[in-house]
Image (spheres, rainbow, N blue to C red):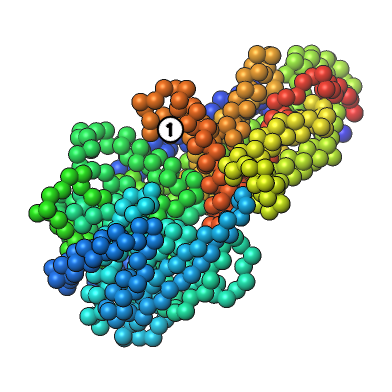
Amino acid sequence: MGILTDASLNQRNHLGRNFLKHNRKICALFYLAGAVWFCCLGHSQFNHATYLSENALSPGLVYSEIKVESARIAQNYLDELNREREVYRSGIPYNWIMAKMQQIGLEVYTHNFTLHYPLGSGREFHGENIYGILRAPRIGSTEGIVFSAPYRPPESVHPDITASVPLLLAFAEFTRRKNYWAKDLIFLVTDREQLGMHAWLEAYYKGDLEDASALDAGNLKGRAGALQAALNLEIQDFDAEYLNVKIEGLNGQLPNLDMFNLIQRIAARELPVREPCGYKQTSPRKRAKNKNAVLENVKAMLSMLLSQANGVPTGNHGLFHRYRVEALTLEAVKKPKSDYQSRGAAVLPLLKVIEGVSRSLNNLLERFHQSYFFYILVSNDRFVSIGDFIPCLLLMAGPLFIKAFFLWLGLNVEDPEMEKCDEDEKQAESSQTELKPIVKKELDLQYSKVLRIFLIAHLIGFLASVMPENRGLNEVFATLGLSSNQFITGLAVVFSIVALLAPHIVELNYDGVELLHIVTLLELASVLVVVGLLNFALGFLLSIVIAPAAILVDRNHNASIKCLNRFYVILLHPLIVSYGVVLILTLNAFPELGLLAVAQRAIGATMDALTYSVVDSIIYGNWVYNAVTIAFLSNWMMLWRVVCYTKTEEGRPKLKTS
């Protein structure tokens, strides 16, 4: 019976009430700590200088062997290709490219693929890639390196990168005359941008395996060794102003940091000062001087996270990462104005950069493993490792775990208004010799009803994820004359309405809603951490938006505060968040337009973004759409049920003695 009169029970009860009283301050403290931590990473004391971890990459940093003769060959190839482009306005001059590869001495193959468009009436798109293989003269075909260039016909809406193919062929001609290659070299020209690269990789790794996906990747007639690395070229002109290095891959994956550092060091040696090279490089004329270094570093980190968050590759290189092949894209941006005398000024430096990269990769005896795979670039020569930036995510998601703990604690302590009664009871107990039982709260957590809401929410999220792929629904909407954008947007609106109404099917009392709130916070925090480990950018940016829900959403407020909470939760709806992001991007892209015009344009852009996210999910395996619908939409529904609780449903259970 001693435990019934233990004074520490009342002390813990009092301590629990104090925690509950200051739970918002504690959650806000963790949230601000995460934001401050991230900002501190922009200071040089909290980040690191880049370096080459793999000594085997050093050969590319020595004297270059490529001469001006190769630059003249590249320029001649470009002139010939421009004449061919006048004939092939909407296609690829296959015969010309194949003839040049055969003339160089490569094993030349073509690769056909077909895309059965997963939305709408199921149109088919056909494409054909061309690739040549230079077999390693010093060893069997055990390993390979890919050099690729996408071909864009004159009618393409993308920036012109015609010079990529001539540069690729000129480098292939140089490699054919050397005998020190220990790896097979693959020179690939892809059709239809990333789709062609995706189809080629699927065929290279899966071969004759049957696949029920929308993409019929076909088969490859010729293969090389196991791919070790890849370099993708996007050369806008041979008179380049600067080089931009693209590293973001599918689902936010990045190449090994050594790959990026190698490009930086070789480019710094081979390129003139007037042609800088770097990540998200811009024109020297657009760079302001005397800026705050820390502020600029934080902006650079946020810019990189924004590029990673959507999970869309910034170039063809991004599709290699899923196969554990380190790859990046080298983009040469042409000058706004150029004259005939400077025509082809950047050809030889570009060829030297490619040669240096290829010789370094040729010397590798094993896959990249020494340097980082998870990092944030602060600048071209400084970075932040995963051990330094992952605490930001944990501190941002921490308030969700903390709030869930405080809510559970609140279920097991007496109400704040009972504190005065407790003091009276203590005085009475001190004046009496008779033992009195402690007061316990009768809980009715309604586990079955909470589980029912949990299952309903996740079922709706799962249906929202898989319904756009349904062939029957697509055909029905196609017969009605609706486009894919209208079909996807219509489904999103329908599921949004269902998400608003479905959780109210099940009635809950006070403790049941409290338990649902705890479950929602725990799952949401766990999802943020897991997503952050897979794609830190997405997890971190979502935590910035979602974590305040743990601080602000509280049902113990007056009517006006409750309305504000509901309004805030509505703003957290995935569809509203998507529109808000697109609206901000549209404002930045079209500052000259009025607010109404920007809002209307943002609606159309949001419809396109939803459609593209579904297509990327089906074809490429981008899991951002699936994560948002299955995890975040489901949790939003449960959080919406929490903030919509009213006392008219059922009052809080009374206290009883035992």
On the image, the x and y values in percent for residue 79 come to: 21, 63
* Depth check, front residue: 538 or 125: 125
Disc 1 marks a residue whose amino acid type is: Thr
Q: Is residue 606 visible?
A: yes
Q: Nearer the viewer, residue 354 or 520?
A: 354
Q: Nearer the viewer, residue 195 or 63?
A: 195
Return the residue nearer the eye: 386 or 560.
560
Quadrant (top left/top right/bottom left/bottom right) for the C terminus: top right
Q: State the residue at coordinates (81%, 40%).
A: 452
Question: Residue 115: image x %, image y %?
Answer: 55, 61
Q: Residue at x 61, y 55 (%)?
A: 122
Q: How many marks?
A: 1
For this view, does 204 lie left or right of residue 279?
Answer: right
Is 578 located above or below residue 102 in the figure? above
Q: Secondary structure at mark 1?
A: helix
Residue 9, placed above or below residue 186: above
Q: Residue shown at 62%/52% (left/top)?
A: 121
Residue occupying the point 48% across, 55% down? 250
Q: Where residue 391 sits in the image (x, y, percent)?
A: 48, 43
Outermost residue on the front side: it is: 87
Q: In terms of image quadrants, where is residue 644?
A: top right
Query: Farthest residue in the left direction?
Result: 341
**Residue 279: horizontal and vertical position, in percent?**
31, 50
Dividing the image into 4 quarters, which one contains the N terminus?
top right
Identify residue for label 1.
586
Q: Residues within 10 Å of mark 1 (few under 14, many from 20)?
A: some
Q: Is residue 395 visible?
A: no
- Left or right: where does residue 430 sit relative to residue 155? right
Q: Is residue 530 left or right of residue 392?
A: right
